Amino acid sequence: MRKRVLPIFLTLLVVMGGFGLTPASAGIKVVVNEKPITTYDINQRAKLIRLIQRSSVAASRREAEKELIDDQLRLEEASRIGVKISEAEVNNAYANIARNVKLTPAKLTAGLRQSGVNPQTLKDRLKAQLAFQQSVRRRFNSQVDVDESDIINALRKSDDENKNISVEYNLQRVIVVVPKKSSKGFRNKRLAESNRIRKAVSSCDSSGAVFGKYSEVVVQPIGRRLETELPEPMRKEINKTTLGKLTSPRKTEVGFEMIAVCGKREIASDIAARTELENELRAKEGEALTRRYLMDLRRRASIVYP
């Protein structure tokens, strides 16, 4: 299933504001497994595609018809294997799109309507995508595998020497403890102390003197970790933290947590390259299985043009 990226289209909402909300004929255009797709359905999806991709009228209508047929097959298959997508999941996906284009869901809805697109058109598309993603995972999760020989061949073909360099960190976890039943005022006090600690620490070797000025500050060694071993949010925060300094305080169940970057070095290793290439190969294999899955659904479907 081809991945789609929804670009920031705030400007397009203004440019394409000329599309009025004039529903086309609701005549049946195509019937998929006895479920009708109307001209109005196609017109609405085509407007959405034009808004996103700026494609021609003819191209967007062809794409819209194909998408709607595939969406119907995706939803039917999801229903057949017991996959259910809740309204909350759809609304969450809709809100994520709004967030990506720096809008609230209400403003995204208003923008779509201004461009002649019923917001339900986008929500229907999201529901079909979510349903099929879960269907694919349920069917192929254990089948997506990558041969070691494929990884080795990919490493040999790589001309980028930097892929053979891994970044290794030496890390400590610093916790400014806040009991669970503490008042809001006490939590704010401990957050302020966390920020003062962060500002004062400039070296892991001398940090003990700073921590000693505050009560209930716990230091836990994390040790050496390759960049690729760190969770994504933590990795981003650590990457931008100066050696010897602490990351921003993060609220946890036990208080405010910061990570001290005590050491950083580059080492010759193919681990980072292997991880990246393995993920790429898995993604490609998953996409191939998804395409075959949808093609199989199309072969077995009854698609009739009245």
Image: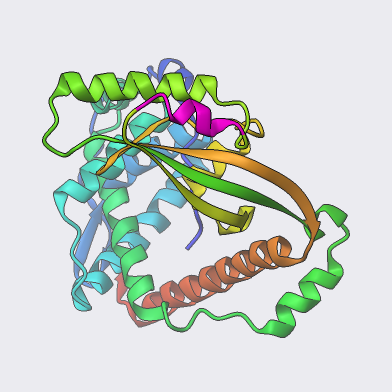
121 or 263, nearer to the observer: 263
Task: Please state if 71 lies on the left or on the right of 142 as rendered.
Answer: left
Q: Please tell me which residue is depicted at 69% across the width and 83% down the height of the picture.
A: 148
Q: Which residue is at the front of the view, 4 or 278?
A: 278
* Residue located at (15% from left, 49% from top): 87
Residue in the picture at 25% in, 49% down:
124
The answer to whether residue 64 is left or right of residue 89 is right
Q: Is residue 115 above or below residue 135?
A: above
Quarter of the image with the C terminus in it = bottom left
Residue 217's quadrant in the figure? top left
**Residue 194 visible (yes or no):** yes
Question: Quick check: is 144 in the magenta stretch?
Answer: no
Q: Is residue 278 above or below residue 222?
A: below
Segment tinted magenta in the rendering: 206-214
Measured as percent of width and height from the top left, residue 30 is found at 29, 61
Q: In the rendered image of this protein, does residue 285 appear above or below residue 21?
A: below
